[in-house]
Amino acid sequence: MAGRIKSGEGTLIGNAGEFYVAAELLKRGVVAALAPRNAPAFDILATKGPKTIRVRVKTKSAEYTDWQWVVKKDGEIFRGLGRKEDFTVLVNLTPATKDLQFYVVPTFQLNSWLVGDFEKWVRTPGKNGRPHDPSNKKRHLNYPRFADQLAPYLHNWEVMWK
């Protein structure tokens, strides 16, 4: 899978993640439907019993360490961010389906991590002591750095329904 993003397959990788998440929800008895392409605030709408939630999906290939976002024009990472009923599933897309990893994280929590990590990055000098650009629009969640924070969310589908 090396180099697939740069070769134009990023959309395919993202779509694969969304389909895998929808399938995982369906096999758990959750009614899940993919939103139209480029829906502004979620990728999947999911209902279990009386509760309906929005699910965002962010997928990376296994050979990469970072999930990546681009800040919107208004400076936000997530459109329509909610404190409840708003989850992001981080998918680590592996060559073998049995090795797929899903981190089911409340989007509000994920946003907090990304904002804090970016603020720390801006304060930390870069190469040769040069300052980092605070207008940079990219945000990264690096797996090795966030492994401890992500661990409780690995395959934790029930967090959506608490």
Image (spheres, rainbow, N blue to C red):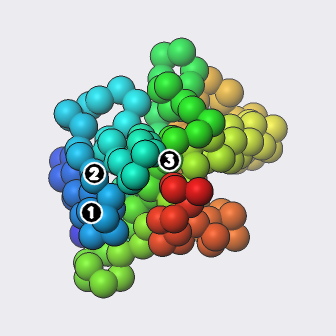
User: In the rendered view, would you say 139 is above or below 92?
Assistant: above
**Nearest to the observer: residue 25 or residue 123:** 25
**Disc 2/disc 1 C-alpha distance (Å):** 6 Å
**Disc 3/disc 2 C-alpha distance (Å):** 13 Å
According to the picture, the residue beneath numbered tag 3 turns out to be 87
First-in-chain label (2 vs 1) = 1
Tag 3 and tag 2, C-beta contact below 8 Å: no
Q: Quadrant of residue 3?
A: bottom left
Q: Quadrant of residue 44?
A: top left
Tag 2 and tag 1, C-beta contact below 8 Å: yes
Label 1: few (<14), some or many (≥20) within 10 Å?
some
User: In the rendered view, would you say 83 is above or below 21?
Assistant: above
Q: Residue at the far front: name it.
A: 50
Residue 114: x percent and y percent? 64, 43
First-in-chain label (3 vs 2) = 2
Type of amino acid under label 2: Ala
Type of amino acid under label 3: Phe
User: In the rendered view, would you say 141 is above or below 103?
Assistant: above
According to the picture, the residue beneath numbered tag 1 turns out to be 26
Q: Is residue 44 left or right of residue 56?
A: left
Q: Which mark is residue 9?
A: none
Residue 136: x percent and y percent? 58, 30
According to the picture, the residue beneath numbered tag 2 turns out to be 32
Q: Residue at x 26, y 79 (%)?
A: 97
Label 3: few (<14), some or many (≥20) within 10 Å?
many
First-in-chain label (3 vs 1) = 1
Type of amino acid under label 1: Leu
Q: Nearer the viewer, mark 3 or mark 1?
A: 1
